């Protein structure tokens, strides 16, 4: 279910990962920040990474990973050679970040340290979506079929399948019973903070991003109206790196 999502921005992420803040074209970055501020009612933004994308036979746009200073939402935008923002997924990422915050809190309440990256699927047209829209209104109006994404969990002997299941079921209920499908990666305790410091700066990742991140296990977990796809006993083993399952 997440294959297309992972491949879609793999090239962009690969390009941008090679370019740190020190190599940013400050003029372009400032221009993007100013253009976005005009688009979104004076809100302030910070360009985190800047790179080129091959749109046609020539490099005709610059792609930026940007963070809102007001909401902390990280998103992607593109500016063409004329200085016009031609695409921005800020409104959609703003909705998905609200989902992430709910799931992360519910996991923390259950003693699980984790962070997530979420995407809404099945919404046909969000051209009029505003980043300050309430999540409940977004779900009621746009009716996403499901939320899917990546969940990064810190290794701990205290992690339990029952806590994971409870957090997901509570999130499912708070999201008006919208199904949840996540690729879960368990990160070794000593590497978690470093991995998360990179993870939170990205508007998207793929499964391949985790290949060198000192992971101890991975699996897919979902909750729908029919229930969850793994029982608590199975999850206890998975959370401790006892098994690796194929991801989609």
Image (tube, grey):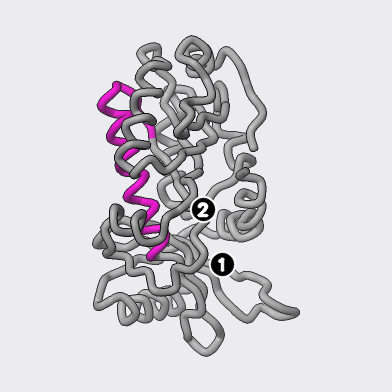
Q: Is residue 22 visible?
A: no
The alpha-carbon separation of the residues under discs 1 and 2 comes to 27 Å
Decide whether residue 103 is among the magenta residues: yes
Image quadrant where residue 247 sits = top right
The range drawn in magenta is: 91-114
The residue beneath circle 2 is 121
The residue beneath circle 1 is 51
On screen, residue 225 above or below 70: above
Query: Mark 1 or mark 2, which has the lower sequence index?
Result: 1
Secondary structure beneath dot 2 equals strand
Q: Residue at 37%, 37% (x, y): give it.
A: 172
Image quadrant where residue 52 sits = bottom right
- Image quadrant holding the N terminus, namely top right
On screen, residue 127 above or below 179: below
Q: Residue at 48%, 46% (x, y): give it.
A: 146
Q: Residue at 55%, 33% (x, y): give it.
A: 213
Residue most toward the front?
226
């Amino acid at each position: 279910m997440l294959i297309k999502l992972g491949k879609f921005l793999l090239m962009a992420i690969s390009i941008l990962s090679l370019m740190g803040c020190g190599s940013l074209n400050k003029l372009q970055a400032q221009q993007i920040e100013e253009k976005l501020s005009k688009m979104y009612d004076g809100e302030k933004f910070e360009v985190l990474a800047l790179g080129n994308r091959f749109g046609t036979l020539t490099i005709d746009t610059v792609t930026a990973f940007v963070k809102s200073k007001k909401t902390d939402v990280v998103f992607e935008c593109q500016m063409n050679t004329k200085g016009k923002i031609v695409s921005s997924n800020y409104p959609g990422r703003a909705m998905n970040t609200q989902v992430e915050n709910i799931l992360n809190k519910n996991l923390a309440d259950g003693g699980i340290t984790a962070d997530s990256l979420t995407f809404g699927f099945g919404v046909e047209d969000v051209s009029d979506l505003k980043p300050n829209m309430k999540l409940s209104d977004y779900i009621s109006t746009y009716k996403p079929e499901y939320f899917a994404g990546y969940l990064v969990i810190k290794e701990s002997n205290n992690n339990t399948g029952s806590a994971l299941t409870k957090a997901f079921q509570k999130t499912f209920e708070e999201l008006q019973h919208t199904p949840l499908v996540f690729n879960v990666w368990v990160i070794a305790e000593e590497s978690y903070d470093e991995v998360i410091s990179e993870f939170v700066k990205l508007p998207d990742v793929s499964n391949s991003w985790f290949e060198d991140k000192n992971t101890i296990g991975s699996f897919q977990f979902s909750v729908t109206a029919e229930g969850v796809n793994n029982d608590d006993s199975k999850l206890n083993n998975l959370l401790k790196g006892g098994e690796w399952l194929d991801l989609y």
